Image (cartoon, rainbow, N blue to C red):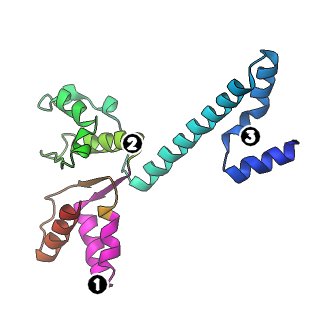
Amino acid sequence: MNEDRLQAAFKQLGWVRIPEILHQHAEEAAKHNIAYTEFLDNLIQEELMAKQDRLIQTRKRLARLPFHKTLEDFEFSFQPSIDEKRVRELATLRFMGHQENLVFLGPPGVGKTHLAVAIGLEAIKARHTVYFTTAHDMIQVLEEAHHRNQIHKKLQVYTKPDLLIIDEMGYRRMDETAAHFFFQIISER
């Protein structure tokens, strides 16, 4: 099989990493007398890792997280009232498996958004879909969709992801329509 046919096959299969590393791995396989199956396994593992990395990057972008901060970035000593052990337990995402809601309460500046984003990043790494919004933005989007008779389509934006992060709850008073939309989202999740 010639180089052009290989490259065309890789492209047709949607493989992007193997074409980049094929020559290097082939030379090493020949030099170290690596078995064909081991050579092939090494290539496929590289492709799978690259695919997983691309999936994670895409999901991060689609999640619309305001920043990318992890639990390792959080200074628990700065907020001694936060139970680090409990937060780390939440990062295991068991609450998602039990279909439980998670609410962080506290005054501004204590790290609620940071912790929510960190848990969102853990969910993305675990191959879950995540969507971040503020309560204000969500209600505004839903009200606009309601006026354009597109509310059902727009509700899916908030009900479809495995994890929905709604930030800044309570900063804006909800009228009856907004409360109805909010209830619809929560009840459908």
Give x and y (percent) for residue 169: 17, 57
Q: Are marks 2 and 1 in contact (CB under 8 Å)?
A: no
> For the residues marked 2 and 1, what is the alpha-carbon distance in whole angstroms?
34 Å
Pick the residue in front: 124 or 37.
Answer: 37
- Decide which of 165, 152 is in the foreground and name it: 152
Q: Amino acid at mark 1?
A: His
Residue 14: image location, x then y, percent: 66, 50
The secondary element bearing badge 1 is classed as helix
The CA distance from mark 3 to mark 1 is 50 Å
Residue 19's disc number: 3
Q: Compared to 155, does 131 lie above or below?
A: above
- Mostly what secondary structure, the magenta segment? helix
Q: Nearer the viewer, residue 156 or 84?
A: 156
Q: Amino acid at mark 3?
A: Pro
Q: Which residue is painted at 11% across and 31% down in the image?
A: 81
Q: Give the label, 2 or 1, closer to the camera.
A: 1
Q: Position of residue 60 (x, y in %)?
A: 43, 48
Q: Residue at x 32, y 53 (%)?
A: 162
Instruction: Tell which circle, 2 or 1, labels the residue nearer the N-terminal end.
Output: 2
Q: What is the distance, in whole Å, between disc 2 and disc 3 at their CAs?
A: 31 Å
Disc number placed over residue 119 in the picture, else none: none
Question: What span is in magenta?
Answer: 129-157
Q: Quadrant of residue 38?
A: top right
Q: Which mark is residue 147?
A: 1
**Are the two marked residues, 3 and 1, in contact with CB atoms closer than 8 angstroms?**
no
**Magenta segment includes 150:** yes
Q: Secondary structure at mark 3?
A: helix
Which residue lies under the disc numbered 2?
A: 68
Please tell me whether residue 67 is drawn above or below residue 136 in the rendered image: above
How many marks do you count on the picture?
3
